[in-house]
Amino acid sequence: MGESITEGTIINWLINEGDAFEEGDIILEVATDKVDNEVPAPASGVLIETKYQAKDVVQVGEVIALLEVSSTLKSPKKTDATQTDSEAAQNTKKQPKKKRSLTSSAVEVSHSNATSFSVNNTNTFFSPLIISIAKEHHISYEELARIPATGKEGRLRKSDVFQYIEDGRPFKFAQPVVQDPTAYRIPQLSFDKGQGKIVEMDRMRQMIADHMVYSKHTSPHVTAYVEADLTNMVQWRHDNKVAFQEKYGERLTFTPLFVEAVAKAIKDFPNINASVDGKNIIVKDHINIGMATALPSGNLIVPVVKNADQKNLLELAKDVNVLASKARDNNLGADDIKGSSFTISNVGTFGSVMGTPIINQPEVAILALGIIKKRPEVITTDKGDDIAIRSMMYLSLSFDHRVVDGFLGGSFVRRVADYFEQFDTNRKI
């Protein structure tokens, strides 16, 4: 499901206990991060037992079901005089490994990592993701155990940890401490949230909410704006989009043109193509452009154009069209949405003039592209200043001010606008 995945959510079992299945039949659906995956049967057989139910969150490596696979079935052996002591011992050794469950793993983890302390939560099993967040913010196991948990069976969710941090970590110290009276603290207010139709967030919306809160908490956001004249690009696409599709069988939208220009600008300013690891900045050696895309459900996902700087316009158009089609049909796979190093969000498709996008972690910048709008502009010609109808666009770059200063952020977004404006109208398809 992806190297970075630490847990998954079972969406639905398509085979019931006791049902037979053929090799390749879809047994269940599992959600990881933002992608839903169908899990096929490795061989023909019968589903004996399910260890988890729909909506359960399961750690990577856990046994979720027991299958009786027909290709490996053998007649049951009787433990009699014909069975040697070594065979019996071998069967005994194999038995515990086959019956491994979440409960036993949870006990092992909690005993190996946690010390004895008084806790508020009864479930002291913490997922690798929770432990990673705790290490980043120097939160001890004792402090973790005091955080109010909202997950199933008292499980601590990452949104619980972020809310706890946002609340000022009230259980950080066992004894009261003297606080700076002038320091700002988040007030604990009770709001009247009103009445109306209650709509429960689906899994993806909950994950988007977690990611957005995490990004705003992690990165101090600053947004820079520039304006670009896209008249040449708009005219060239209008003149060539029909011929492009007839020649290559691919639609020519603005997106591959945008991706191409952004990739060029990243090569000019490679430090914008980075992520933060503690006190280190990782400048990526590949340019993978994520393009924020709306799903039919209204949720947002970011498929990735890999190695965008190494592809020509036709290859970029193919990638963009395939990813957009998969997104519309909810067919994006784990590989389609991982590995981005910089993200663009075309808010202009919804009619927005400009936007202030939230950084797609762990990247350090995201570019929003506003609507292309015709309006009269003062331009300079050989004959002097004149007024003409031009196709204009606002670009807004949100960047992480921990590692990207105003000079780099402003220079980069201006360079993207320059590539838009300097588009070669004589370019051949």
Image (cartoon, rainbow, N blue to C red):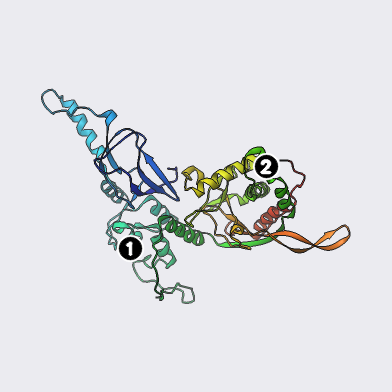
The amino acid pointed to by label 1 is Arg
Question: Dot 1 corresponds to which residue?
Answer: 146
Front position in the image: 72 or 397: 72
Marks 1/2: CA–CA distance: 61 Å
The x and y percentages for residue 370 are 63, 59
87 w.r.t. 191: above or below: above
Secondary element under disc 1, as helix, strand or loop, is loop
Secondary element under disc 2, as helix, strand or loop, is helix
Q: Is residue 312 visible?
A: no
Q: Can residue 42 be seen in this view?
A: yes
Classify residue 225 as left or right of residue 157.
right
Residue 143: quarter of image:
bottom left
The x and y percentages for residue 397 are 62, 58
Badge 1 local density, few (<14 within 10 Å), some, or many (20+)? some
The x and y percentages for residue 137 are 44, 58
Question: Dot 2 corresponds to which residue?
Answer: 244
Residue 87: quarter of image:
top left
Front position in the image: 267 or 396: 396
* Residue located 37% across and 41% down the image: 39
The amino acid pointed to by label 2 is Phe
Residue that sits furthest to the top in the current view: 82
Classify residue 274 as left or right of residue 9.
right
71 w.r.t. 167: above or below: above
Label count reads 2
Q: For the N terminus, which image quadrant?
A: top left
Labelled disc at residue 231: none
Residue 161: quarter of image:
bottom left
Badge 2 local density, few (<14 within 10 Å), some, or many (20+)? some
